[in-house]
Image (tube, rainbow, N blue to C red):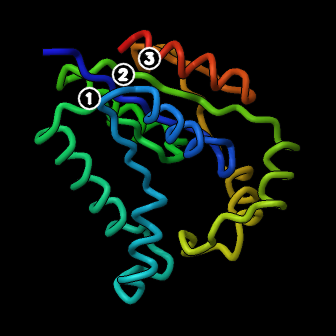
Amino acid sequence: MKKRIVIMTVGKTHSGKTTFAKALEVHLPNSVVIDQDNHAEFLNTHYKSLLPKTATNNLKYGLTQMIVDYAVNETDCHLILCNSNRGIGGRVRFLEYYKSLGFTTIVLNFDIPEEVLLERVKNSERSTSILRTALNFEEVLMRQNGEEVTDPSEEEADYLYVIKNTEDAQTVISEIVRLA
């Protein structure tokens, strides 16, 4: 059996995580993108009355976990986890889980300059339907800038890549495809 890979994206809003994940999925055969923004949009559209007003969105996390469990246990797909994953505790816990299942783990840290992120959120045409406690993506970015976050380290995963621009993304896609 071919070794499976799990790729975890880490980064602020509008850093390119989803764009990268979709591009990687096209180039990496037998892979699936699991994007929590899709789950948030689905829940906000169809089950808004079930969502907590301020507390942790356990429904979103539960839906994501169910999809991940299915992909892990019922398919042989490589997984591309497209979330912010900025907290070290959860990130390390998930990576250890995948390692215990025999996955090769890859972390992609999107370290995009602040001025680029600000420009992207100001010009964003992304739907705000994924947002629950913020009015817009500028507010999300400002909140993220106020958070204490530990950047991913090489000890967390089998491979760590830092993406600072579009050119880095293309190189990393080629590297991951080669690894697979």
The residue under label 3 is which amino acid type? Val
Marks 3 and 2 sit apart, C-alpha to C-alpha, by 14 Å
As drawn, 125 above or below 162: below
Local packing at callout 2 (Cα closer than 10 Å; few below 14, some 14-19, many 20+) is many
The answer to whether residue 125 is left or right of residue 28 is right
Read off the residue under disc 2: 105
Q: What residue do we see at 34% from left, 84% from top?
A: 50
Q: Residue at x 69, y 76 (%)?
A: 135
Residue 81 point in image, percent of width and height: 41, 41
Front in this rendered view, residue 54 or 19: 19
> Horizontal and vertical percent for residue 55?
45, 73
Q: Disc 1 marks which residue?
A: 98
Q: Indicate the quadrant where residue 29 lies.
A: top left
In the figure, is residue 72 to the left or right of 160? left
Q: Residues within 10 Å of mark 1 (few under 14, many from 20)?
A: some
Q: Place residue 161 in its image quadrant.
A: top right
- Please say if the residues under marks 2 and 1 sit with CB atoms less than 8 Å apart: yes
Q: CA distance from mark 1 to mark 3?
A: 19 Å
Position in image of residue 1 (x %, y %)? 12, 15
| Residue at which label 3 appears | 177
Q: Is residue 77 left or right of residue 11?
A: left
Mark 2 / mark 1, whichever is N-terminal: 1
Front tag of 1 and 3: 3
Q: Earlier in the sequence, mark 1 or mark 3?
A: 1
Q: Kindly identify the amino acid type of the residue bearing the numbered disc 1.
A: Tyr
Q: Mark 3 or mark 2: which is in front?
A: 3
> Where is the C terminus found, in terms of image quarters?
top left
- At mark 1, the secondary structure is helix
| Numbered disc 2: secondary structure | strand
Residue 115: image x %, image y %?
A: 88, 44
Q: Amino acid at mark 2?
A: Thr
